[in-house]
Structure formats: C-alpha cells, structure tokens
Amino acid sequence: MKIQHFLITLLSCVGLFACDLSGLTGDGGLLDDLTGDGGLVNDIIDTAQTCITVCGKVEQCDATPPKAQFNLGTSNGEVNELLNNDITACASNCAAPNRAKFGYSDCQISCIKGESCSNVEACWDSSSSAYKKYCNPEIKPIPGVNNQNSTGGTMSSGGAMNEITIENDTNTGNEDVDRLIEEPAVNNAIVDSETPVNVGDTPPKLTGHYSVMGTIDRASNARPTNSPINTGICFADTEETLTGTYVTYCEDGVPGIGRAPIVGNANKFSVFFEIDGAPVTILFSGEINADDSSVPAAEALVTYTYGLDIWEHSVTGWIPDDPNCTCR
C-alpha cells in the first residue's frame, strides 16, 4: 500500500522531532502520486506529524508504552495480537486507524504531549490524575450496586434487583472490588458490556480446577467476536478478612499465583483477576450449580485498563475436573 509506505517513510523520523516534508509534498512528490485530494493529504500529514511528536516525546522521556496481549483465556500459548512497547511500535500504533485500541486516543495524545517526562506513563493509566485531567472519564452507576451505603444487590440487564445486606462496611462485599469498580476503565466496561456484578459479603466457595470454554460475543477495541476462550483455572485456597474474601488461583499455562477478591451471595459470585505486570483486569460473574459444582454460564469481561472502551465479553462454561488441584 502506498499510504502505508508513506507513513513508514514519514514516521522513520521519530526521535528527530521534526521532518523535512518538502520532498514528499512538492510537484511530482509522493503525495501527488497518492491522491489529488488535498483533504486526505492533510489528514495524512497531520497524523504523521502528531505521531512524530508523540513518539519523540516517548523516546525522549524513556517512557514505556502499554504492553498487553490480546490472547487472554487461551492456554495453548497462541498469540493473537501483541502491543509492543518499543519505539517502532509507538509509531505504527499511534498512526493506526484504531489507535485508541493501542493507547493513543486523542485525549491520551494530548496527555503525552502536555505532561512532564516523569508523568507520561500515567497517560496510560485510566485511574491516574493525569489521565483524568485530559480524558475526563465518567464513573457510571452500575446496575444493582449501591455506592452510597452498605446495602446493595445484583441485577443483570433487564432483571430485577434483589436486596442483599452487606455487613462488612463495604459497598460490594470486598474493599478491593469497591476500588476496582470505581476505576474508569473497569467501571465503563462493566456498564457498557452489561456484565452483572453479584455483590455480597458471603460468596460461595470456589475450589478445585475448572476447564473454562466459550467465545467472545461482544467487544470494543479488542479481539473480534467469536474469538475462542479455552483455558483452565485452579482455585486453591480461600481467605476471609474483615473487609472481604479472597481466593488464591492460577491459570493453565500462565506463570505465577494470583490472589483475587470475590463477592457474592448464596451460589452467585463475582471474582476479579488483576494480571500481574499487565494493564488487564478480568471479571467473572456466575452461579455455581449446587448439584455438580459446575458454572454453566459465567460471564467473563476482560478490560484493558490503559485506556477507555477496550474490553471483550464472553459467556463461558466452567467444568470441574480436579477438586484437589494446587498452585505452585
């Protein structure tokens, strides 16, 4: 593609902070070969010059752009897409038509250009004051979650709320879940994807290994619908504290052991995984089948927290297959 070649040529100036465009814009230059439409030419030049400035600033500040892998929930190691964090990737991601997916929305570009070097990386944290300053994210009310006192409920889209009394001085049943649902990226993804949060301070006990399978049914700036979810999760231990319950877990093919806050009541639960070293939060909301401990239809929401509106939703089936699994 000539336009792609043009951008690559132009963006090779990254780090120089300025480029001589005369060879590309004069009579017989590359732009004349691309199109006679001055509007398109100007758009291309504006994008290129913006990305040269932005990526030059990233390089000058020795900042690390977000690095997230769009293949969560696939334990076979297949890499669907990777956000690289080198300067070449900055240029291509910034210039992409869907650049918000890669952490270069218009407000994030303004943030990178406007903040000091010490604060550039905060432009990729939707909960930071720098991000809020430029992007002004809205914290939306979550159906069934009462943020004003210690009484809440749970409501799926179109459902009726069931009042649940929470007695541990939190809004959801766990102080970390309270925090997570107020983070802009997670909050917006929950509301926009219509994923329920099953609140309560008496969640059911998740234990043993589950095979987890499903497909993405809706998404924003992430993997396409019908992408597979095929993994396994071991829930090893449960810890009850004064401000909420936590489960220890590990995922097949993923190194490390996690500790996740869980809320819920009776057989319904919501559990939040925060991926160590990655700007990702995963919410599972479901109901345990009392007969066989399966979870027939757990809603899964993967939120990429380096910007707004980057998420994928699926409905997954959980099949218990090893009650004595361990995480090491």
Image (spheres, grey):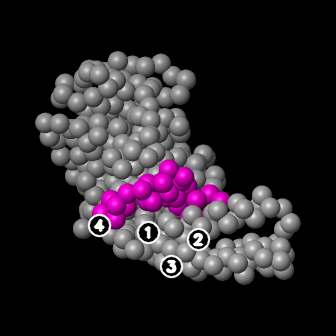
Q: Secondary structure at mark 1?
A: helix
Q: Nearer the viewer, mark 2 or mark 3?
A: 3
Q: Where, quadrant-wise, is the N terminus in this rendering?
A: bottom right
* Segment tinted magenta in the rendering: 93-121
Report if residue 131 is visible in the image. yes
Tell me: residue 75, above or below residue 148: below
Name the residue: 67% across, 76% down. Answer: 21
The answer to whether the residues at label 4 and label 1 have Cβ atoms under 8 Å apart is: no
Tell me: residue 319, above or below residue 47: above
Residue labelled with disc 1: 57
Name the residue: 41% across, 24% down. Answer: 144
Q: Nearer the viewer, mark 4 or mark 2?
A: 2
Tag 1: Cα neighbours inside 10 Å, few (<14), some, or many (≥20)?
Answer: many
Q: Depth check: 44 or 326 in front?
A: 44
Residue labelled with disc 3: 16
Q: Secondary structure at mark 3?
A: loop
Q: Secondary structure at mark 4?
A: loop
Residue labelled with disc 4: 256
Q: Is residue 213 left or right of residue 262?
A: right
> Which is more N-terminal, label 3 or label 1?
3
Name the residue: 36% across, 42% down. Answer: 183
Tag 2: Cα neighbours inside 10 Å, few (<14), some, or many (≥20)?
Answer: some
Name the residue: 29% across, 31% down. Answer: 172
Kind of residue sitting beneath label 1 = Lys
> Which is more N-terminal, label 3 or label 4?
3
Q: Depth check: 38 or 150 in front?
A: 38
Q: Is residue 229 left or right of residue 137?
A: right
The secondary structure that dominates the magenta segment is helix
Percent coordinates x, y for residue 82 in the rendering: 51, 69
